Amino acid sequence: MSKPSRHAAAAQTDAGTPQRCGFIAVIGAPNAGKSTLVNALVGAKVTIVSHKVQTTRVPVRGIALADASQLVFIDTPGIFAPRRRLDRAMVDAASTAAGDADLIVLLVDAQKGVNDDVARILRQLEGVERPRILVLNKIDRVKKEQLLALAADLNARLAFSATFMVSALSGSGVADLKTHLAAHVPEGPWHFPPDDLSDVPERLLAAEITREKLYERLHQELPYSATVETTAWQDRKDGSARIEQTIFVERDSQRSIVLGEGGRTIKDISMRARKELAVLLERPVHLFLHVKVQEGWSDDPERYRNMGLDFPKS
């Protein structure tokens, strides 16, 4: 996609300095901070962030430059024990991304340590023949002695080529991690234009932004079973974009929650999403939201195709 894009010119390299380019899968348990880290590494928002677990549903690629290296970060859905069809599709997408990447970054929430989800991921990574980098996140909330003990424990369980400690939210340690990754991706030409920040289609990005605002506004009230699709997009002559989206829920009671009394809730969600989309797309946005009840949408193959996921058969 051409937007969002970086305004700065591509990094110029000295004669004889080889270009590098690599795909880096950022994996971890739900809510480890993967989306926040990818946004920090890219230097712009390319994937949505929410306190709600398992917010990222599809692998999102964010693109960063570091000297002669182009880094393509794959923000993957959190790996956890799947219970539903959508869960299985998300876990499969994360596992595929890890298997196809040049480097794997395992992000661990330093506060939670090695829980069941992290232990499961460690077992899965044993058979992946890719360089693995361990990153402990949220280090500002944990004592140094605990961090060192956690790093030692994880390295004893699985061999990592390097270990970093960061706070993705504040940016602490992110630059050092980025420099390391830039030096270790394979030599080769860049895969994307130098001003691209993501390869996510604009329609999907717009839907994800609205889904983020939906969760922000209704984190407690709305169940996980809601999704957003961009159903119409018109580039207008005045340079603005007219976007129509549908929020799918599974019950009438959920529709009432999203609409709110007198339509106040959906108006607030629309306003928040429209403001962020205008910044990302760098032009005025006219956003129109609709709410539709579709029971069992999470078992509809078309919904999975629209989200860019493979539909599990069982």
Image (spheres, rainbow, N blue to C red):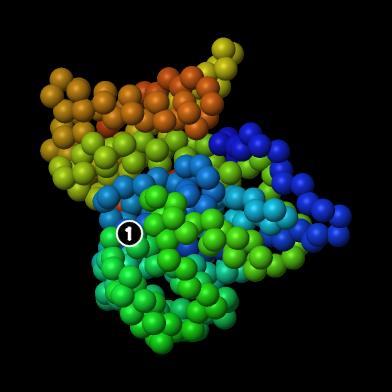
The foreground one among 199 and 144 is 144
Furthest-front residue in this view: 144
> Which quadrant is home to the N terminus?
top right
Where residue 259 sits, quadrant-wise, is top left
Judge whether 18 appears above or below 5 on screen: below
Q: Residue 13, position in %: x, y?
A: 78, 51
Judge whether 137 appears above or below 262 on screen: below
Residue type marked 1 = Asp
Q: Residue 138, position in %: x, y?
A: 34, 60
Judge whether 81 appears above or below 156 on screen: above
Disc 1 target residue: 140
Determine the secondary structure under disc 1.
Answer: helix
Residue at the spot 35% in from the left edge and 63% down from the top edge = 139
Q: Residue 145, position in %: x, y?
A: 31, 75
Residue at the spot 72% in from the left edge and 61% down from the top edge = 20
Residue at the spot 76% in from the left edge and 58% down from the top edge = 19
Judge whether 288 appears above or below 95 on screen: above
> Which quadrant is home to the C terminus?
bottom left
Horizontally, residue 169 falls left or right of residue 187, namely: left
Horizontally, residue 131 falls left or right of residue 173, namely: right
Q: Residue 284, position in %: x, y?
A: 48, 19
Where residue 161 sits, quadrant-wise, is bottom right
